[in-house]
Amino acid sequence: AYLHGRLIAADLIALGITVDCLPVLDVRFAETHAIIGDRSFGADPDFVSRAALRQTDGLMDGGVLPVMKHIPGHGRARVDSHLDLPRVEASVEDLHAKDFRTFRMLASQIPIAMTAHIVYTALDAERPATTSPIVVRDIIRGE
């Protein structure tokens, strides 16, 4: 993962690009849409966090600022968020135990995040995370 980050950074720096929307911190779940697929480091939040941190180190050592995504987690989405609005029905406890865990573990290491355009019904059934004060203010910034 470190080498992957360094190689990506070298290509981007050669083009004059100094920011990249990596790492993908989404935890993969069975029976969900393939939009995240192999962009995720896997189904284990601890492994995802470790691999993403190494990729982040590679990007930063190569002169590229990383942007973690898709906070607070895209892994449970059952539809492509580029085409439809996913609704995640997981409980708050399940979201905190797996989905949000990777972001909490790396929040102090990566200064910028891209939000997930997903409705988390247990948090805010009316708005996607990108426009939800509950998710952005209370969950992402507050926790």
Image (tube, rainbow, N blue to C red):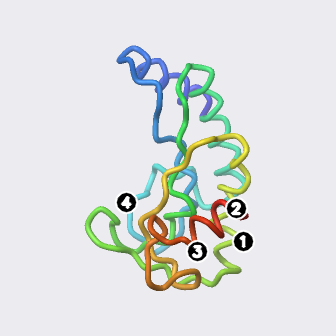
Residue at the spot of label 3: 134
Label disc, if present, on residue 35 of the rendered structure: 4
> Which quadrant of the rendered structure holds the N terminus?
top right
* Residue 126 vertical placement versus 61 (above, below): below
Horizontal relation, residue 56 to residue 20: left or right: right
Residue 143 or residue 37, whichever sits in front: 143
The crowd level at tag 1 (other Cα within 10 Å; few <14, some 14-19, many 20+) is few
Residue at the spot of label 2: 101
Nearer the observer: mark 4 or 3; the answer is 3
Label disc, if present, on residue 117 of the rendered structure: none
Distance between mark 1 and mark 2 Cα atoms:
6 Å
Residue at 62% x, 43% y is: 52
Residue 24 or residue 4, whichever sits in front: 24
Residue at 57% x, 82% y is: 90
The crowd level at tag 4 (other Cα within 10 Å; few <14, some 14-19, many 20+) is some
The crowd level at tag 2 (other Cα within 10 Å; few <14, some 14-19, many 20+) is many
Nearer the observer: mark 3 or 2; the answer is 3
Q: Secondary structure at mark 2?
A: helix
Closer to the chain start, of discs 3 and 2, is 2
Horizontal relation, residue 59 to residue 138: left or right: left
Closer to the chain start, of discs 4 and 1, is 4
Distance between mark 3 and mark 1 Cα atoms:
18 Å
Label disc, if present, on residue 97 of the rendered structure: 1
Kind of residue at disc 1: Ala
Kind of residue at disc 3: Ile
Kind of residue at disc 2: Arg
Residue 79 percent location from the top left of the image: 35, 72
Contact, CB < 8 Å: mark 1 with mark 2?
A: yes
Distance between mark 4 and mark 3 Cα atoms:
25 Å
Contact, CB < 8 Å: mark 4 with mark 3?
A: no
Closer to the chain start, of discs 2 and 4, is 4
